Amino acid sequence: MEMHAFGALTPVEVARGRLLRAVRPIDRVERIPVEAAFGRVAARTIRAPIPIPTFARTTWDGYALRSEDTHGATTRAPVDLRVVGEVFAEQSFPRALRRGEAVAIATGGAIPRGADAVVIFEEVEREGSKVLVPRPIPRGDRVSPPGHDFARGTVLARRGEELSAVALGAIAACGVPTVPVYARPIVAIVPNGNELLSPGDRPRKGRIYESNNATLAAIVSAAGATARTEAPVPDQPERIERSLRAALASADLVLATGGSSVGERDHLPRILPKFGPLLFHGIAVRAGKPTLAVRVGPKLVIGMPGHPTSCLVNMYWLVLPVLRKLGRRSGPGWTEGWAVLGSDAVAATPGLATVVPLEFRGDRAYSTYRGSSVITSLRGASAYAMLRPGQRIVRAGARIRVYHLDPPLGPGRIEAARRNR
Amino acid sequence: MEMHAFGALTPVEVARGRLLRAVRPIDRVERIPVEAAFGRVAARTIRAPIPIPTFARTTWDGYALRSEDTHGATTRAPVDLRVVGEVFAEQSFPRALRRGEAVAIATGGAIPRGADAVVIFEEVEREGSKVLVPRPIPRGDRVSPPGHDFARGTVLARRGEELSAVALGAIAACGVPTVPVYARPIVAIVPNGNELLSPGDRPRKGRIYESNNATLAAIVSAAGATARTEAPVPDQPERIERSLRAALASADLVLATGGSSVGERDHLPRILPKFGPLLFHGIAVRAGKPTLAVRVGPKLVIGMPGHPTSCLVNMYWLVLPVLRKLGRRSGPGWTEGWAVLGSDAVAATPGLATVVPLEFRGDRAYSTYRGSSVITSLRGASAYAMLRPGQRIVRAGARIRVYHLDPPLGPGRIEAARRNR
């Protein structure tokens, strides 16, 4: 059993920076219905083709009138106007309003030509074909003029923006039925290792079930991308290479899991450099050291550690920002904050940065870490801290920088088995 | 044009409470691949069918040995063990380890019978078929015993829990390929109004484009449900009734938009009570007063105001918690907090509660409200406050209770049109 050593390890920020510089944001565009576009990324700046409202409308039920006709009106001496018609929302009064006239109008109705204000039903008395107005109604009252909501040319969504309910409502209000959005990036996930079974396979001695597909697919979907998982590939260099080439041909980014370290069966460090320039192999961090990446034209292949915890932790601090940039989403996928540590945080290995997954109880943050091979190391974690290389311990009570994850790693609901009595 | 009056208005909390009591959480269950289950709601409590790890494994590359063989070892007088084989991750050593023997073992490999500890390669020297161990290796060192990650019977996900990456990883690690989840609720959205055109229709005088479909579909999808939007239905009671009955037959909840007030063309208050008991008509709130709901067996039909802002604001404070309960998701869809008001918040109408959409600039919250008919009233809003009925004004500088929305209403990116010079 041969072992090699890692060369110089790449600092965390350097590794992430190289990936972020190398990744090319997706260019494929698709046109989808406005009703289905929530959260998708606008591929073009969308400006209002018409003003909204497009014509002067009333926002209340009442009578459209000419403001000047109501000058001097009082409760004692109301002005009476002749009601010459009614306008429902979809209608428009066929002629201009003349002096002394009013038109009953429903919310949303077009203000007749000549009218410039609306008095609500509750304020007036109707007497046959007349309506008594008890006060002067100012010009523009209860009238929503063209462009009151937004003018023609208003930017409703910028290229690169995640489309919100409000933006989509504004786009629909202009009569635009579809929006151009960037395609969801396709991320292939290719596990390798002779010991791996696919969930659902018959159990076999010494074998374990592949589980990184499930966790990585979750984060890929959380980043707005589409995950394409593959069955585990055996430890044969030519089969691994073939699988990765096939994945590269159809995906925008490839995540290979397992075989990323320096052992005899770790084939990725020998295979990946055939594809393109090596960005790094070995990151100065625990968990997550056995990680490597190559650039293949506009694409990336990232070799991730097989240990479930290392793999999932890496996915957050290293890969999620890359996925977001690939999908043209802004921000790294976390928000920074401060927290008070509830228990000591100890460096995993001297000289390496240490990722400390954190669970919040009350206003204190506690490490959930139990080792890189156990997925329950992340149970309940909703944030992480990063100890700097050389930092040996951070004491309980210390105020530390934390990175809140969205979505959180785990909801803290992997519970101990109940004991049978 | 006839107008009726609202009867007694229902307070905000009462209206929401009636809907929450009436809604029946979804019962349909589907089985989906673990890789596709992120964020879905577990329909059954899932316990680990096997312990993980299932067999004792090593978490490092090294030599498996018998701890007792290394008693008394020192750097000067190392114990030498005979290397009798090697075990890669998927293999298992065919016999029990005998006194004085060691087996080379790769990360993840099964600990041979008889062995009870692992020493890592870096700590020892190899001399031909022998390995020199320079210190006593404690029993259990570098060994992950069965159940170390989690024991058989451990609850990996509780019924009703949104499945996290960690939970799915743990489920996959047990070899379970699919999970039972609650179906996404289907929510039909049925607009009505003669004035409404569908986006993409040819513009017509006095008509406006229907836009509530787009905003409500966004929030429905944000709640993890599936939106089914329909083309606007004209103001004919029998056509509206037919559309709603068809929607009820195939959807879990129906949102009717427009025609929910008390005017001549507001048909919902006459149609909906035919379907089942009226829960309320008219809520003591602005925006959002013309809202009604009926219970139809296990389902609900909610009549929402046609004004885009009223409709979308209602969707948040009234309907989102109902959608979440329908889909068996916990929490109302917002998180409560406190904020300092940056500008005065003024009650829209005396005696009604007032929803104040809020935008954060720095650490202060500013109202974005400009009226219920304009969608830009919500531009940038990421939270809202609710003024109590009778509360006339809240002054700038006041500390107020706010409800942070996830996702935010709008990203604040509807920008003024650039003026041509």
Image (cartoon, coloured by chain):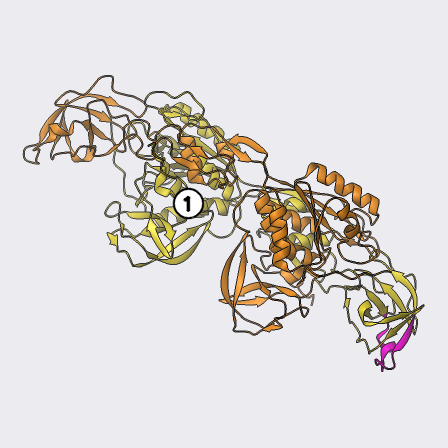
Chain colours: A orange, B yellow
Which span of residues is magenta-colored? B65-82
Does residue A266 appear to the left or right of B339 in the view shown?
Answer: right
When the figure is inspected, residue A334 is found, relative to residue B261, above or below; the finding is: below
Q: Residue furthest front?
A: B421
Which residue is denoted by mark 1 in the rendering? Answer: B316
Q: Nearer the viewer, residue B156 or B107?
A: B107
Q: Quadrant of residue A1?
A: bottom right
Q: Residue furthest top?
A: A94
Q: Position of residue B128 (x, y in %)?
A: 94, 68
Q: Quadrant of residue B75?
A: bottom right
Q: Nearer the viewer, residue A98 or A335?
A: A335
Residue type indicated by callout 1? Tyr
Does residue B283 appear to the left or right of B63 in the view shown?
Answer: left
The structure residue drawn at horizontal position 48% and vertical position 52%, both measured from the top left corner, is: B331
Which corner quadrant holds the N terminus of chain B? top left
Q: Secondary structure at mark 1?
A: helix
The structure residue drawn at horizontal position 22% and vertical position 17%, both measured from the top left corner, is: A95
Any magenta on residue B72? yes
Mark 1 nearby-residue class (10 Å; few <14, some 14–19, many ≥20): many
Is residue B44 shown to the viewer in this render? no
Any magenta on residue A356? no
Q: Nearer the viewer, residue A122 or A277?
A: A277
When the figure is inspected, residue A215 is found, relative to residue B192, above or below; the finding is: below
Is residue B288 shown to the viewer in this render? yes
User: The residue marked by circle 1 belongs to what chain?
Assistant: B
Q: Position of residue A420 (x, y in %)?
A: 69, 65
Q: Position of residue A50 (x, y in %)?
A: 37, 28
Q: Residue furthest left?
A: A76
Does residue B39 appear to the left or right of B206 in the view shown?
Answer: right
